[in-house]
Amino acid sequence: MTTAEAPAREPDAVVRRTRAAALAGLLGLIVLGLAWELWLAPTGSGTLALKVLPLVLCVAGLWRHRMYTFRWLSLLLWLYFMEGVVRATTESGISQVLAVLEIILCIWLFTASALYIRWRLRHPLPGAAAEAVRDPA
């Protein structure tokens, strides 16, 4: 039986929990970004709500356990973290509170993604080696 014919194995509990935590943080960051820029403390005509578009694109990859998505999301998060730090230190009122919440969600999502990536590298899913190694021909 080859790896292509092997039955798919369910991810273990650590993978499921870290993915759930990452998805929760990602969805929280998306909702926060939309609510912040459209209703709670809009900074203009609402075009800044488009900043969540890259995050929306990550949802499917996280849902399907795509390591590549977890990796580039963990790098993309630092842009949102920097925005939160800048806005937390320069704004006041509800915008400052929302910025601190953005920072917390970024740290939460980065931690969950890092734990997921480290666990998957140490305990690969069946068939993952076949996907990682491609024939040069």
Image (spheres, rainbow, N blue to C red):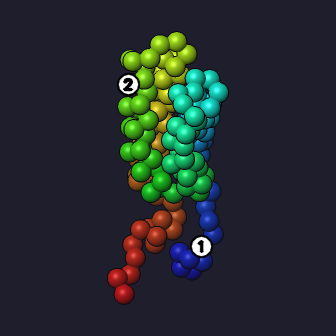
In the displayed structure, would residue 57 be above or below residue 102?
A: below
Q: Which mark is residue 54?
A: none
User: Residue at position x 52%, y 12% from top?
Assistant: 93
> Dot 1 corresponds to which residue?
6
Estimate the x, y position of residue 45 in percent, counting from the top left.
Answer: 57, 34
Q: Which percent across, then down, holds residue 35?
A: 62, 30
The image quadrant where one finds the C terminus is bottom left
Q: Is residue 55 left or right of residue 79?
A: right
* Residue beneath the point at 38% across and 25% down: 86
Camera sees residue 11? no
Q: Which mark is residue 86?
A: 2
* Residue 130 shown left or right of residue 26 in the figure: left
Left or right of 129? Residue 25 is right
Asked which quadrant contains residue 38, the reply is top right
* Farthest top residue in view: 93
Residue 9 higher or lower than 58, as above or below: below
Judged from the image, the secondary structure of the residue bearing numbered disc 1 is loop
* Position in image of residue 3 (x %, y %): 53, 75
**Which numbered disc flags the more N-terminal residue, 2 or 1?**
1
Q: Secondary structure at mark 2?
A: helix
- Which amino acid type corresponds to the residue marked 1 in the rendered image? Ala
Q: CA distance from mark 2 to mark 1?
A: 50 Å
Q: Is residue 129 above or below residue 10?
A: below
| Residue kind at label 2, given as amino acid type | Val
